[in-house]
Image (cartoon, grey):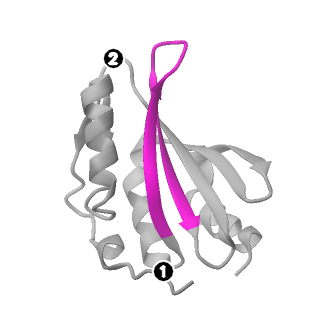
Amino acid sequence: MSWKEIEKDLLERFGDDFSGWEWSRISRVRASLRPGALPAAARFLAESGRVRFISATALQTAAGAVDVWYHFDFYQTAQVLSIRVTAPQDDPVLASISDVWPNAGWSEQEAARAFGIRFRKDTGASRAGGRQKEKAG
């Protein structure tokens, strides 16, 4: 499956929730996602069987908000998708994706300690990402 097909699948399912698609280079794509859509997007990526969670990073913006960047690797295309979710300044709560991608919990804990973001569990999430298998290289 090509990257364009993956992008098309994401936009068909989450079109209005994504914004600012940006190709920073041939193998890296960045986009912003509405915070409320994060759990469903994480499940969609995990259930595709084509993606693995790499890491998440958090940073404070010049305006004082905190952006959390989730980074995903696509097995078949050598592409990395980085999804930015911005925590609201007045109530810095985001949904956790650690129910779907257990290894995301480490990065979310670091963001919570460093920036005071509270990550809430999505009780409807499956652990599809937790059953992911590494592809033989």
* In the image, residue 94 lies in the stretch drawn in magenta: no
* In the image, residue 70 lies in the stretch drawn in magenta: yes
Which residue in the rendered view is the most extreme toward the top? 63
From the image, tell me which residue sits under label 2: 90
Where's the N terminus, which quadrant? bottom right
Q: Which mark is residue 49?
A: 1
Quarter of the figure with residue 113: top left
Q: Residues within 10 Å of mark 1 (few under 14, many from 20)?
A: some
Which residue range is magenta in the image?
A: 52-73
Query: Of residues 94 and 17, which is closer to you in this image?
Result: 94
Between the C-alphas of marks 1 and 2, the distance is: 36 Å
Question: Which amino acid does the dot numbered 2 rest on?
Answer: Asp
What residue is shown at x 40% (from left), y 66% (from top)?
Answer: 43
Q: Secondary structure at mark 1?
A: loop
Relative image position of residue 136 (x, y in whole percent): 52, 87
Quarter of the figure with residue 110: top left
Query: Of residues 26 and 9, which is closer to you in this image?
Result: 26
Where's the C terminus, which quadrant? bottom right
Q: Is residue 126 left or right of residue 39?
A: left
Residues at marks 1 and 2 touching, judged by CB atoms closer than 8 Å:
no
Q: Which of marks 2 and 1 precedes in the sequence?
A: 1
Establish if 81 lies above or below 1.
above
Question: What secondary structure is the stretch in magenta mostly built from?
Answer: strand
Establish if 77 lies above or below 116.
below
Q: Secondary structure at mark 2?
A: loop
Q: Is residue 94 left or right of residue 68?
A: left
Label total for image: 2
What residue is shown at x 38% (from left), y 78% (from top)?
Answer: 132
Question: Which amino acid does the dot numbered 1 rest on?
Answer: Gly
